[in-house]
Image: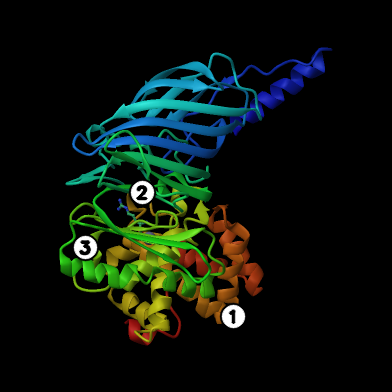
Amino acid sequence: MRRLLVATLATALTLAGTALPAQAAPAPGGAGLGDEYFPDYGNSGYDVSHYDVRLRYYPEQDRLTGTTTILAAATQDLSSFHLDFVLDVASVKVNNRPATFAREGDHELVVTPPRAVTRGQAMTVVVQYSGVPSNKVAAGFTAWTRTADGGLAVGEPEMAWWWFPSNDHPSDKATFDVSVAVPDGVEVLSNGVMPRNPTQDILGWKRWSWRSVKPQATYLAFLAIGQYEITRDTAADGQQVINAYSDLLPPDFEDAARASVERTAEVIDWESSVFGPYAFEARGGVVAPPGALGFALETQTRPVYSSGFFRSGANMSVIVHENAHQWFGDAVSVDQWKEIWLNEGFASYAEWLWSEAQGEGTAQEIFDYLYATEPDDFWTVAPAEPGAAEIFGGAVYDRGAMTLHELRRAIGDDDFFALLRTWTAEKRYGNADTAEFIALAEKVSGQQLDELFQAWLYTPSKPAVEGASALAR
Ligand code: ARG
Ligand code: ZN
């Protein structure tokens, strides 16, 4: 952004002094998007509208080969630009012409097209590549998970680098086509709908195709490759419901997983009644092989779950949480990673609301319990300023949810639920930040709420609570 302003100013100055329009010199795009916690995640100088990721995967070698085609528009006159990527690049073309490319740092690919791209111009970027993603270390680790029968690309905030070149930041959302050829008998899951059934590829191989048609953050794109049992259904509104269960799940895990994931369409209907219309075109869930993942992720239209969530029976909380993220995180996305409580605090509060709706304990009871039992060090992290190391810490989830509960008590149920629905309606398919949420809360309620948000979101100590204090001490 700053670079653009300077260039514009330079152009204006030059114009003032000469008769002929002068061209601002094209400048390199940057290696980041100004994210306060992750300054080199994403890249500046262009805006992606679509990724076409076309791969082949060899499960025995954990080897990926393929091509990603990126449709983008330059947001400045660009002499070169960055992609975030770690696999081995064979060639890059920009607008049909071979470009040169070089590595920088541990996840940057710098692409120099033979001629500069002008501001506003469409760019078609074709990257051919291959590699063993589980061998690539970046940011100190490997986000790709190799399983006994395939692999998983499921992670936050880092994941895309290991399977497709991208502008890897939630502030640049795009639509996706993902297709992967695999040996017969192997399944491939990704986001959105299957526009067609798997097609014959080379002898003994099938190609699977997935399409996600609403703006999607790069970290919400996923791949699950391996032996999966797939269930298909049609929701009341006609949407494809596609769930998948790893064949490696022990039978008792599989029953508990199904008793949870098969209720996804019901959960989304309930969440729609609380948060407003569902923003996406499909529903589902994927349960990973045992031991493969240590978490669940709200991958767009189809969350992926660690099998561990279903160890001791059905677990609706995790289904409610990951699908609530379809509103908070996926439809309305953070514009900076420091705003992550807008995802996790809201998805956690959805669990409380579900509990309340099921008659299993009210949100107030859950609040009181946490308020009374969280240890001192829990209160030292402010949810809206957690620090990069704490973006998935307890404060972001639990204190974030407690913040929403205190807001609900302050403005009342009518305004609180109207606020949630207005937020998702106004911001869906885009990005948002905490200041915008606070402003909307004040607008909807007509109340001055700075003190409440300051205490709950920005102060690294335990906020005082009125009323509930008897229980809490
Ligand atoms: N957004 C995910 C969830 O709430 C959390 C992912 C955490 N990722 C991680 N690598 N710890 O459920
Ligand atoms: Zn979450």
Between the C-alphas of marks 3 and 2, the distance is 18 Å
* Nearer to us: label 3 or label 2: 3
Q: Amino acid at mark 3?
A: Gly
Which secondary structure lies at badge 3? Answer: helix
Residue 29 % position (x, y) = 53, 26
* Residue 414 - label: 1
> What is the quadrant of the C terminus in the image?
bottom left
Q: Give the farthest residue toward the right.
A: 19
Q: Do residues under tags 3 and 1 come within 8 Å of each other at their CB atoms?
A: no
Residue 187 % position (x, y) = 29, 49
> What is the quadrant of the N terminus in the image?
top right
- If you read the primary sequence from the N terminus, does the residue marked by circle 3 or circle 2 appear first? 2
Q: Is residue 138 above or below residue 94?
A: below
Q: Amino acid at mark 2?
A: Glu
Quickly name the residue at label 2. 156
- If you read the primary sequence from the N terminus, does the residue marked by circle 1 or circle 2 appear first? 2
Q: Amino acid at mark 1?
A: Asp
